[in-house]
Image (cartoon, coloured by chain):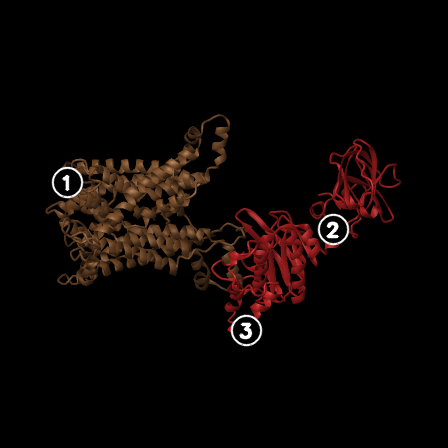
Chain colours: A brown, B red
Amino acid sequence: MSRKLAIAIYAGTALFFALFFVYPIWHTVQEAFVSNDGSFTFSYILEIFRNPIYVEGLKNSFYMGLFSTLLSLLIAFPLAMLANTWDFRGKELLNSLVLVPLILPPFVGALGVKQLLGQAGALNSFLIDLGLMSADAPDDWLGEGRLFGVVLMNALHLYPIAYLNISAALANVDPAMEEAAENLGCHGIRRLWKITLPLIMPGLFAGATIIFIWSFTELGVPLIFDFTRVTSVQIFDGIKDLSGNPFPYALVVVMLVATVLFYLLGKWLFGREIAASSGRATTGRALKKASPAMSALCVGAFLLVTGLAVLPHLGVILLSVSNQWYGTILPQEFTSQHYFDALGHPLTLNSIGNSLKYASLATLTNVILGIGIAYVVVRTKLPGRQFLDAMAMLPLAVPGLVLAFGYLAMTREGQPFDFLIIGENPLLILVIAYAVRRLPYVVRSAAAGFQQTSVTLEEAAQNLGCPPLKALRKVTLPLIAANLIAGGLLAFSFAMLEVSDSLILAEQQAHFPITKAIYALVTSLGTGPHLASALGVWAMVFLAVTITGAGVILGKKMGALFRV
Amino acid sequence: MVSIHIRGLVKRFDEVVALNDLDLEIEAGELFFLLGPSGCGKTTLLRAIAGFHMPDAGTIKFNDDDVTQVPPHKRETAMMFQSYALWPHLNVFKNVAFGLEERKVPKAKIRERVDEALAMVKMEGLGQRKVNQLSGGQQQRVALARALVVRPRCLMLDEPLSNLDAKLRIEMRSEIRRICKEFGLTAIYVTHDQKEALSMADRLAILDGGNIAQIGTPEEVYRHPRTPLVAGFIGETNLIEGTVAFSSGDNVYVTTAIGELAGRPSDPDWQPEVDEKVVLSIRPECLSIEMSPPTQNAIAGKLSESVYLGEVAQYSLLADGHEEPIHISELNPRRVIRDADQALYASARPEDVILLPAP
């Protein structure tokens, strides 16, 4: 590729980032510091810390992030250790099944959790049937403030990210490092603590960071649980009176700063990069053959975790086919009516169409940007290309809510980007919003493809008379197609399930994507939750198909997509 | 410091037999080498002694202790890994101190012994360095110090020099041998570099197919290989097939495709019978080049290639009836014969022509 073209791509993507990543953040930040008369003020921020409701929200958000992260690690770590020590029957299958919860929409799952763990839920009914609980005073498992339910749902959704990161880190540890410790008398838990854990800490931290940022700013799950005292929901509620109220902006800024601070603190504590020593690993990690008992334990652990993680969604499926489900273990009556109703409802068909449209356009944008960025980063020597690479990964680290809010602010009437809302249609800004947040996955997978494909293949084509761009199209792109498809599928799935942008940016029913339609149905009366579940099930079936495809194509390399 | 006694050791990996009923005795304080082509089982044997492979059958004893079932962290061996396996999250001092901490040595004592060990490998004052700030040779020294500092019952070295450049490798050879001898360590050293083995070993074992092909001092193994494989693996050699014609005195006369050659059996206890098939091994440096027919062990042929290496000239001679060229090395050559197709003769003294049983 010519240098001119590379520079053009660089400039184009940098401009895209400046307009749709830096500017919305800047716009939001700025609003938080400008008073009504246009002068600079710190008072909104200070007011946040004076208002006990906002402070409680921040505290709860922090707990939500911290506990979700810890629980995710607690689930993922033992599994990753088992999978990286033992060879057992059915491992390949279990290894991919255990990742499935990542693409099950968590805020749909939250409906199921409420149904299972609520006061009149399935668990209580079960315990009452067993005589272990009094029917008059059932426990509320979700607890005061609903934090437990939210954390549980987040962890069951996000642990695959930790699993992928820890597995990748473990696989990269030279087995001789552990053998050397063993050889010098260090064994078992001590060895894990003194050698293995420090060596995988960067990978563990990378996973934990994403989980923390994700759950610290999670909007969909607390909304469904009606857990209003977290910052994300407070921001969302604040939009309703957006014009006059500066506090949502101030809250967004506080959240953004907190995210950065927690990230830096974590990086300082755990994430210091360890450069591998120069000696090359001589033996691959040999997995031990599991005895029948150990095999059973491994399979059991994987099935237990996967089972627990899909339980909320099973609850959703049951809910979607039930007429009556209150105070019993299983629904009293079954019906398929909700599926037909869901498809006949004015909200649903429309929203499915909208989501498909938004997500496909966003994915297309991602693939084009992703190829461009990855090419510049991997194949050129352009100065500053690492900067482009780092920038492309940043959206992983910035809360979706912050960006969504920025997009909303910059497309309001009278703002420089109000032309992106055509009439009342948020199509363009939603596509951009979806694309920016998912770009890292596509860039990573495309870059991996370029790295694995020797540049000499392309040079050979050029040498035989093929012009550079044509060589790229005819030789390299077909070779990295698998990576692009996998990255694209992942981006597509996440776009279909997007919550913050969808809830905040789509204001008219006619333009609702699936997630906002589900949210609208949940909050409506009557059969709303059942319809929402049915719609959720449609969405999940859809995603299961795409992500299985991605898993099959990408195999073990999936882990590379979830690193900052 | 222990002597090591191995009896009937068997290790299988699925269908592959890595160690096949192997017996071995290693004496206390000995620098013992395991040598052989890749896949011969040498690393498996080393790892079995260290406890990383549980054998399927057989016993391993350190002195009189049966350690066959003892897990690696209780064997008190110390291994130097091919990749060094220095822990990147610990500095040099911490790496070396690790084994002492595991052995609950008091803090002050640890400092003293680590400093001593670092001095021993000429790394004094570098304790606070990060591992990735060290050169390959320095990493190798730290790995050695880490293994030595615990005063192991047995030191294990798994191709420790294979990641170093040629000059450093030669330097480290004598260094490792010096340290082993100073400590009086029992050491087992795996390598595929025959020069390393010949120059350092007290004794060495050549492994083939999971079993020991030959065991002995470097001189014994080099000068009296017992099988064609050993002869070919240690040093260069010319292997010529033939049948025994008759014996006379110490010499056995063998009929080969390139004429009758007189040699001596590699094993003095073995008297090959007339008509028995044998293989002759003649090292290139044992052959001399002659312009006129020599009286004994004459090999006639045509010169096909000559290579001048300074201290040595190497000739290839195409002898009638033998497919492989016969290699000849002439030390301190005054004049290199370069005329292609020149008719020449090679000859060797009967004591340098080794009779081996045909495989």
Of all residues shown, which one is farthest toward the left?
Answer: A526
Question: Could you say which quadrant of the image residue A443 lies in?
Answer: top left
Q: Amino acid at mark 1?
A: Gln
Quadrant of the drawing holding the N terminus of chain A: top left
Question: Could you say which quadrant of the image residue A64 lies in?
Answer: bottom left
The crowding category of the residue bearing disc 2, from other C-alpha atoms within 10 Å (few below 14, some 14 to 19, many at least 20), is: some
Examine the rendered structure and indicate whether residue A99 appears above or below residue B145. Answer: above
Q: Amino acid at mark 2?
A: Tyr
Q: Nearer the viewer, mark 3 or mark 1?
A: 1
Q: Disc 3 on helix, strand or loop? A: helix
A543 vs A358, nearest the viewer: A358
Image coords of residue A342 (percent x, y): 16, 39
Examine the rendered structure and indicate whether residue B252 appears above or below residue B131. Answer: above
Image coords of residue B111 (percent x, y): 54, 70
Image coords of residue B188 (percent x, y): 63, 59
Give the Cα distance between marks 1 and 2: 90 Å
Image coords of residue B255 (percent x, y): 81, 38
Q: Which residue is mark 1?
A: A508
Q: Is residue B285 visible?
A: yes
Q: Which chain letter goes with mark 1? A: A
Image side of residue A299 versus residue A114, left or right: right
Q: Which residue is mark 3?
A: B109
Q: Which residue is mark 2?
A: B222
Give the Cα distance between marks 3 and 1: 76 Å
Q: Which chain letter goes with mark 2? A: B
Q: Disc 1 on helix, strand or loop? A: loop
Give the Cα distance between marks 3 and 2: 45 Å
Image side of residue B348 versus residue B13, left or right: right
Image side of residue B184 versus residue B126, left or right: right
Q: Nearer the viewer, mark 3 or mark 2?
A: 3
The crowding category of the residue bearing disc 3, from other C-alpha atoms within 10 Å (few below 14, some 14 to 19, many at least 20), is: few
